[in-house]
Image (cartoon, rainbow, N blue to C red):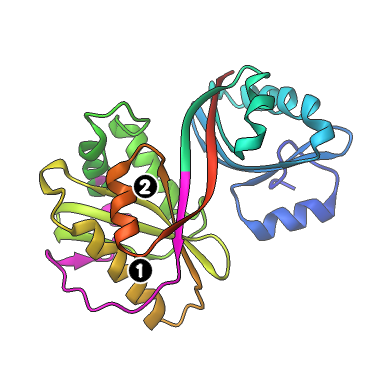
Amino acid sequence: MDQAFPHSNSTEVSRALASLGDSWYVLASDRPIALFKAEISHPTANVSTLCYDGALFESVIPTLREDLRRMRITDFQVDVPPGQTDSFLSKGFETHAVLVRFSRVPRETKMMPILPLMNPTEKEIPTLAKLMYEAYAKTKSAYSDAQSTENVIRNIMSGNLGHYISGASFASGAFPKLESACLLTRVSPTEVNVSQVFTHPLYRARGLATTEIASAMDRLVKEGEGVTKLTVWSPETNDVMKRLLTKMGFAPDKRAVEMTSKI
């Protein structure tokens, strides 16, 4: 029952949520009215998936806002299909960014690493968080403070965004000095997502991210994981990432709009 948010009296829903993982929740009034996947990192809730009956939209958003407020959440972010943005704008949301998902079938590669590669684990969280902070420090990003970056890394490795694949995640450099990292999570039996890829500003444009993504594909194929799709979400305005992914054979296949709201 602790998988439900708030508590639902439907044991069927609770069992289903338990099988999906700790980041899936059900929103319930007299019955379940919505299902969503959220990364809760006080004071922010990042909702990557929100499923509901369109006819119930008027009750879903106010109820969800109220329950998040009770959890001391002040900032609410949700990814929605482009066709639903008007509905969220009418509820006081603002458009933050447009995201594009790139995907491809993993394949074996023979790319030689530029720097030594390692598979990062939870022991490296402080080092990775510092690297991520340095990568975003000069941008207007949600990741531009040290505590936020540590929360992001910890959420990935704890499985909140899907099963963390340590063996196919790579960091470049000689520990404890790391220069770049690529962290992968499994989002379905056949799909793996590059949850984060970031490089220290002084080491950009050297092929480190390319090498890490290529090494990740190679490892997924050789381990026989049954993965048929590798995905990467990128802001539509990030031309550097789009060029890198296109050069590696990724193609855009989905779009989402990041909407934000104060609670």
Q: Position of residue 61 (x, y in %)?
A: 71, 26
**Which of 214 and 145 lies nearest the eye of the viewer?**
214
Which residue type carries mark 2?
Answer: Ile
Residue at x 70%, y 53% (from the top left corner):
17
Q: Which residue is mark 1?
A: 168
- Does residue 139 appear to the left or right of 35 in the view shown? left
Q: Which residues fall within the magenta stretch?
A: 100-126
Q: Which mark is residue 153?
A: 2
- Does residue 43 appear to the left or right of 249 in the view shown? right
Q: Which mark is residue 30?
A: none
Mark 2, other Cα within 10 Å: few <14 / some 14–19 / many ≥20: many
Quadrant containing the C terminus is top right
**Which of 237 and 45 lies nearest the eye of the viewer?**
237
Q: Position of residue 43 (x, y in %)?
A: 49, 26
Which residue type carries mark 1?
Answer: Ala
Q: Position of residue 47 (x, y in %)?
A: 58, 38
**Which of 82 and 71 lies nearest the eye of the viewer?**
82
Magenta span includes 73: no
- When the figure is inspected, residue 242 is found, relative to residue 261, above or below; the finding is below
Kind of element beneath mark 2: helix
